[in-house]
Amino acid sequence: MTSRNEELFAAAQRHIPGGVNSPVRAFRGVGGTPRFFASGKGPRVTDADGKVYIDYVGSWGPLILGHADPDVLEAVQTTAARGLTFGAPTGAEVDMADLLCEMLPSLEMVRLVSSGTEATMSAIRLARGFTGRDLIIKFEGCYHGHADSLLVKAGSGLLTFGNPSSGGVPADVAAHTLVLPYNDIAAFNEAIDKYADKLAAVIVEPIAGNMNLVDPGKAFLQALRDGCTRVGAVLIFDEVMTGFRVGLQGVQGHYGITPDLTTLGKIVGGGMPLAAFGGRKDILTCLAPLGPVYQAGTLSGNPVAVAAGLTTLKKLRAPGFYESLAERTRQLTDGLTAAARKHGVAFSAQSVGGMFGLYFRAAPPTSYAEVMEADSARFNRFFHAMLDVPGEGHYFAPSAFEAGFVSATHTAADIEKTIAAADAEFAKLV
C-alpha cells in the first residue's frame, strides 16, 4: 500500500528537481522516501501519514525554542497583520541590529539579509573589497552556502588551488580559493606565509556542523586569528549554524576568540528566512551606500522574519537557558554512547550547547579525514530503524555528515524514550 509520503514524493519529482528544494532532503544519503511534514509542536513533528516523531533536526538548527513557539507565533501574526514587506526601513530592523551588536561584542555594525548563503557570499565580497586582495582560504568539510567561490574542493596538493565541487562553477573562480585540511595548524601556517600578500580572508566554521559536528578546540582557532592579524587578512567566523546555538555568544564567546566578520543565520530568524553579517566598523563601512562594495536585497530585514528573530533572541537570554539546553543535549549523547557500548557497537557522540554529533566510530572525529572513517552504512541502518520505531519515531538528520539539534522543549522523558529505542536498535547492529 502506497503511503501519502510516497505519493507526495512521486508528485514532487514531476516539477521539482529530485523532488526536493534542498538536496539533503531527498534522502539520497540514507535511501528511502523522505518524510513530508504537515505540522510541528514543541519537540515533535507529524508527517503526511500522521506518524509522529521526536525531532532532532529542528529545521537544521533554527528551532531552538521548538516548533510553533507561542510567543514567536504571536509576534509573527501581529507583524504580518500590519504588512508582509515594505522594501523600506522599519524600526524593528534597528532593534535587531542593536540587539545583535549587544549580544555579540565582535559586531560593531551589522547588515541583515535573507539566507546564510547570502551572508557568507556578502562577507567574502566585503573582505575582498576591504583588503583589495582576491584569495580566500576555506577548510575541507566546511560548508558556507552555495556561492560559486565556496563550492570548491581541495586541489591535488596541499598548497594547490581548489577545484570546483559543483557543475556550473568556473575553474577560474575556484582558482581564487585555497582549501586546507580542517584543524591542521601546520598546513594553515605554511599557506598563510606563502600567500600573505594575496590573502583577503579566511572563512571557517569555528565548530563544524556540515561534516557532522567537529570541534577543533581553541588552538586551531587561535592560530587562524594570529595568522590573519599577522598578514592583514580578514578572519570570518561562519556562525550561521553555531551562532546562539552553542551559547549566547556563539563559538567566539565559547573560546574567547574575536573574528573580524561573523555570519549568522538559522536562529536569528527564529524559523523565518533571516540572516546577517557583521563585524568591525572599518570593514562594514565599505558597504554601499557608504563604500564601494555593493550588496542589496528586496527582502533584507523583512519585518515578519525580524519579528520572529527578535522574539527568539530575547527568550534565549533567560537565566539558565543554555545550561539547561546543554544538560539535555549531554543526556542524549551520553545515553546513546552508553547504550552502544553495552552492545559492543563502535559508536561515539559529543555535544556543544544544544548541538550534537553522532558517529559510528570509536571516538569523535577531529578532522574531515576522521569523519570519513565513520561507518556510514551502519548509520543509515540506525537512521531508518529509529525513524520506523512503531508508534512514535525519532527523526535524526538524514545523513551521516550532519550535526543534530536539541531544543528547549525536549524533556528528559523525550530523551530517555529516544535512548531506549536506540538501545533496542544497537542490539541488532552488532
Image: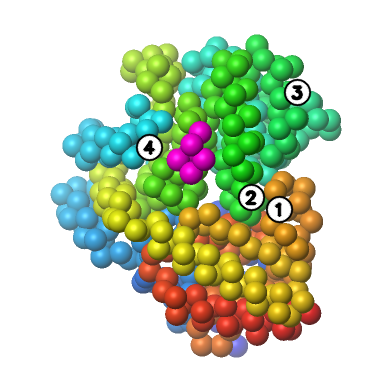
The residue identified by callout 4 is 104
The amino acid type found where label 3 is placed reads: Glu
The residues tagged by marks 1 and 4 sit, at their Cα atoms, a distance apart of 28 Å
Please provide the residue range marked out in magenta.
252-257
Mark 4 packing: few (<14 Cα in 10 Å), some, or many (20+)?
Answer: many
User: Please, what secondary structure does the residue beneath circle 2 have?
Assistant: loop
Residue at 61 percent of width and 72 percent of height: 336
The amino acid type found where label 4 is placed reads: Leu
From this view, report whether residue 161 is shown above or below residue 375: above
The residue identified by callout 3 is 190
Q: Are marks 4 and 3 in contact (CB under 8 Å)?
A: no
Secondary structure, magenta segment, majority class: helix
The amino acid type found where label 1 is placed reads: Pro
User: Please, what secondary structure does the residue beneath circle 4 have?
Assistant: loop
The residue identified by callout 1 is 365
Residue at 48 percent of width and 36 percent of height: 256
Q: Are marks 2 and 1 in contact (CB under 8 Å)?
A: yes
> Can residue 183 be seen?
yes
The residues tagged by marks 2 and 1 sit, at their Cα atoms, a distance apart of 6 Å
> Can residue 20 be seen?
no
The residues tagged by marks 3 and 2 sit, at their Cα atoms, a distance apart of 23 Å
In percent of width and height, residue 269 lies at 36, 49
Front in this rendered view, residue 255 or 369:
255
* Applied colour scheme: rainbow
Image quadrant assignment for residue 217: top right
Kindly identify which numbered label has been placed on residue 214: 2
In percent of width and height, residue 266 lies at 43, 49
The amino acid type found where label 2 is placed reads: Val
Of callouts 4 and 2, the N-terminal one: 4
The residues tagged by marks 4 and 3 sit, at their Cα atoms, a distance apart of 31 Å
